[in-house]
């Protein structure tokens, strides 16, 4: 563990990032009744049914119901005779996730992109483009967090040479060549994060931010055993941060607190953890754009800050109106925010 230091605060604002990790359950929690058009948000185990793959899997010799899709898909990838089946599954996954649309009314994703600041990071394992859709419809976003796509994304394209990222179909702003569609990293036991340049760059940035982060929120990500390599990458950076002993891990999940703390014991320092069973109980929801300051006040000053949660509203514009004075305060660098 690195030599421990006190978190840095400038003009009343904590400079360390809040890193938020989204698992498949986060998109499910955001759209419990499906997307704008009623399409279900699949968890990995639901893919065979939702993508109507069961007939194809049975014809290829797999026994239904599929108990562990990761295991099945790993087998498919390992056997060359299943090459066509693999291509078909990947195609269906890509098409299905490309079509998912955020519901019209304000959503967890709107709160995530507007409730964090440019120093903060949202790293997602999800293939859906909900983060990007929320970014596009939230006017306050120009001052929002960075996104990292740890398993690729259906709505991200890039030019590796120029390190330019954009939408599929766009051209690179530097070399003028068409941007390359991001690959999706599929659920196989041994994922090779370094193989694809874009995905490797996302992981590098995540590691860099975790090594300096103050808050680390894990939102409905189960850290499955097939992600062991990813877990240890993250844990190593986080626990070697110079402010690790001052920091806090927040877990947003429906499971029992004891079970969650056991699951993440390798990254939680002492008692520095909190559990929210619903996003509305999270740091970001209750301290929009001030999550790291709220941590600072409660952990270092022993003076928890009053919650000023997102209001219950019907339109995205109302979220922007709520966020606006907070953004102005940040831009003016005011010192009177409780430093
Ligand atoms: Zn280029």
Image (spheres, helix red, strand yellow):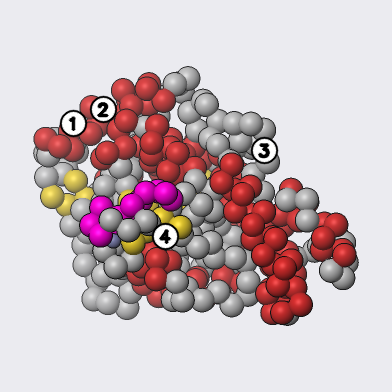
Gap in angstroms between the C-alphas marked 3 and 2: 33 Å
* SS at badge 1: helix
Q: Main secondary structure of the magenta part?
A: loop
Q: Which residue is identified by label 4?
A: 180
Q: Measuring 34% from the left and 61% from the top, which residue is drawn there?
A: 159
Query: Height in image: 4 above or below 19?
Result: below
Which is nearer the eye, 300 or 151?
151
* Numbered disc in front, either 4 or 2: 4
* Numbered disc in front, either 3 or 4: 4
Tag shown at residue 324: 2
Relative side of 302 to 193, left or right: left
Which of pointers 3 and 2 lies earlier in the amino acid sequence?
Answer: 3
Which is nearer the eye, 196 or 126?
196
Which of pointers 3 and 4 lies earlier in the amino acid sequence?
Answer: 3
Q: Which residues are magenta?
A: 164-175
Residue 117 figure quarter:
top left
Q: Measuring 41% from the left and 55% from the top, which residue is drawn there?
A: 157
Q: Is mark 1 within 8 Å of ligand 1?
A: no
Gap in angstroms between the C-alphas marked 1 and 3: 38 Å
Circles 4, 2 touching at the beta carbon (< 8 Å): no
Of the 4 image quadrants, the one containing the C terminus is: top left
Which of pointers 1 and 4 lies earlier in the amino acid sequence?
Answer: 4
Gap in angstroms between the C-alphas marked 3 and 4: 27 Å
Circles 1, 3 touching at the beta carbon (< 8 Å): no
**Place of residue 276 in the rendered image (x, y in percent of width and height, measured from the top left):** 52, 45
* Numbered disc in front, either 1 or 3: 3
């Amino acid at each position: 563990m690195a030599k421990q230091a006190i978190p840095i605060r400038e003009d009343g604002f904590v400079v360390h990032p809040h890193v938020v990790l989204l698992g498949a359950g986060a998109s499910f929690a955001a759209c419990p009744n499906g997307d704008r058009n009623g399409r279900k948000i699949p968890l990995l185990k639901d893919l065979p049914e939702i993508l109507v793959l069961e007939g194809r899997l049975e014809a290829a010799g797999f026994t239904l119901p599929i108990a562990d899709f990761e295991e099945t898909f790993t087998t498919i990838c390992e056997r060359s005779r299943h090459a066509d089946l693999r291509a078909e599954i990947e195609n269906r996954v890509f098409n299905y996730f490309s079509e998912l649309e955020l519901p019209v009314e304000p959503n967890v994703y709107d709160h995530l992109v507007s409730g964090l600041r440019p120093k903060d990071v949202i790293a997602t394992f999800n293939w859906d483009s909900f983060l990007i859709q929320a970014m596009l419809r939230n006017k306050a976003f120009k001052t929002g967090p960075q996104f990292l796509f740890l398993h690729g994304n259906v709505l991200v394209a890039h030019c590796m040479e120029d390190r330019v990222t954009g939408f599929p179909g766009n051209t690179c702003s530097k070399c003028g060549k068409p941007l390359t569609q991001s690959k999706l990293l599929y659920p196989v036991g041994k994922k090779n994060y370094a193989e694809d340049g874009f995905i490797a760059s996302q992981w590098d940035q995540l590691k860099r931010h975790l090594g300096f982060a103050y808050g680390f929120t894990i939102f409905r990500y189960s850290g499955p055993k097939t992600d062991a390599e990813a877990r240890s990458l993250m844990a190593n950076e986080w626990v070697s941060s110079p402010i690790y002993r001052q920091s806090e891990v927040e877990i947003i999940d429906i499971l029992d607190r004891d079970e969650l703390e056991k699951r993440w014991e390798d990254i939680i320092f002492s008692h520095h953890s909190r559990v929210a069973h619903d996003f509305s109980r999270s740091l970001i929801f209750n301290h929009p754009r001030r999550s790291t300051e709220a941590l600072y006040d409660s952990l270092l000053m022993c003076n928890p800050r009053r919650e000023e949660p997102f209001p219950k509203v019907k339109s995205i514009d109302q979220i922007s109106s709520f966020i606006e004075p907070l953004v102005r305060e940040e831009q003016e660098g005011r010192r009177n925010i409780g430093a």
